[in-house]
Amino acid sequence: MKRSVILIAGFLIALTPPALAQDGSFVFQQTPQPVSALQFQDESGAPHSLKEFRGKTILLNIWATWCLPCRKEMPTLDKLQAELGGDKFQVVALSIDVAGPNAVRKFFAEFNIRNLALYIDQTNRSAADLGVVGLPTTLLINENGQELGRLVGPAEWDSPEMRDLLQKYIGARSGSRSGIDPVATAIRVRGRAVRSDVPSALMLETSCKMEM
């Protein structure tokens, strides 16, 4: 392994709160963690806050139109919202495009994204507040606005395995682990075994570095 990758891994371990286990490439927290009251806008420029979604399980996806892995996974998030979205669950796709809502609107039209609301934070403060180091980054947030876990890199969100995983948390009692085994296990990322209790630098190989 290259020295730079080792250094990145050490940096991530230092920054990431203790994790319980990894499931579907999610790194879950030992206990739910508070999430900043993010501020962002919709396509008309109206202000919004993450607090508006209290009472729902939220899949918060931080992305940008210039990020190729983001572009690839966005249709699967759209399908996930169509299948599971409702009173108990919502996908919140938050763009950090500095080009503004027109760039996202054009992308949505090009890829036929119909089920996701257009939310944008041109200031990039949301990504900074969440400690995002690569795009896409997706947080699973419970009905009380607390982070249960996060996934760095793209995923097939409309796959049966991912839907089954998310359904364990949708509408679950706050603080419940919903069947997650607290014993660290091994998963496979891009064909290599990775300890599930350690944030994986390998995920950065399939994500976009943050633009400054």
Image: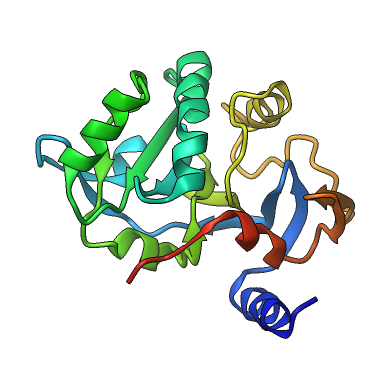
Residue 54 point in image, percent of width and height: 38, 38
Q: Which residue is drawn at 59% across and 76% down?
A: 15
Residue 26 or residue 75, whichever sits in front: 75
143 vs 1, left or right, is: left
**Which picture quadrant has residue 154?**
top right
38 vs 102, left or right, is: right
Residue 35 point in image, percent of width and height: 44, 57
Classify 169 as above or below 9: above
Classify 124 as above or below 188: below
Q: Residue at x 86, y 55 (%)?
A: 192
Residue 97 or residue 197, whichever sits in front: 97
Count the marks: 0
115 vs 34, left or right, is: left
Report the quarter where the N terminus lies.
bottom right
**Residue farthest toward the top in the current orientation of the protein:** 83
Residue 173 point in image, percent of width and height: 62, 33
Q: Can residue 100 be seen in this view?
A: yes
Classify 84 as above or below 157: above
Q: Which residue is drawn at 16% across and 39% down?
A: 102
Q: Which colour scheme is used?
A: rainbow
Residue 117 or residue 146, whichever sits in front: 117
Q: Residue at x 61, y 54 (%)?
A: 206
**Which picture quadrant has residue 16?**
bottom right
Q: Can residue 143 be seen in this view?
A: no
Report the quarter where the C terminus lies.
bottom left
Residue 197 point in image, percent of width and height: 80, 62
